[in-house]
Amino acid sequence: PIGRDRSREVFKMFDVNNDEQLSLFEFKSVMMLLFSNVLLRVLVQWMLTILIVPMISQKIVHDIESGLNATWIFITELDEHTSLANSIEIAVESVRDYLLSFGWINASFSFLWNLIPVSVLNTIPITLCSILLASVVVPWIIFKIDDTFQWIADRLSPDDDKKEN
């Protein structure tokens, strides 16, 4: 939202005759600018949060899954006698053996994992991606909208007309 100092600046910009009072026309211009700023911010925030963020999240998760599947297919189709295949197999086996060496952690994890419904587990990647996008991208876009309205206000400022005359 616009701050007190910025509000005063906007009111001064639209005070054509500098009498520190706004005429009806000046007041309508200020209100139109401020209302359009708020309305567009609300519309963009809702549109991004409800429509765009979930769609982008699904696309990101799908691309990650496709990349992982392609990597898995590549690894499984490697010739067993290549050094790369042997290195990958040894690394995977050592990680598996290390994780299995913690039997009580493995049992606890398996118990907790089985308590969570599969439908919930399937939504975790999209939920995490949506949270990230909604907490980073949406505020950034809203700040850019504010900058756009500031630019419009600066262009429409009656002070510019007075300077030219």
Image (cartoon, rainbow, N blue to C red):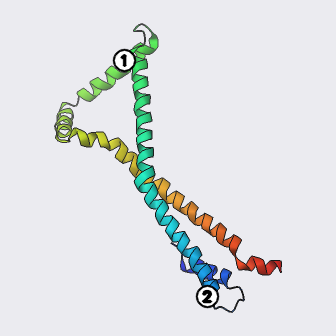
Reading the image, the residue beneath label 1 is 90
Identity of the residue furthest to the top in this view: 81
Q: Earlier in the sequence, mark 1 or mark 2?
A: 2
> Which disc, if any, is residue 61?
none
Identity of the residue furthest to the right in this view: 165
117 left or right of 124?
A: left
Dots 1 and 2: beta carbons under 8 Å?
no
Q: CA distance from mark 1 to mark 2?
A: 79 Å
Residue plotted at (50% across, 65% down): 41
151 left or right of 112?
A: right
61 left or right of 13?
A: left
Q: Position of residue 163 (x, y in %)?
A: 80, 79
Tell which of 110 and 140 is nearer to you. Answer: 140
Mark 1 residue type: Ile
16, above or below 122, in the image: below
SS at mark 1? helix
Reading the image, the residue beneath label 2 is 24
Name the image quarter holding residue 125: top left
Q: Position of residue 3 (x, y in %)?
A: 54, 76
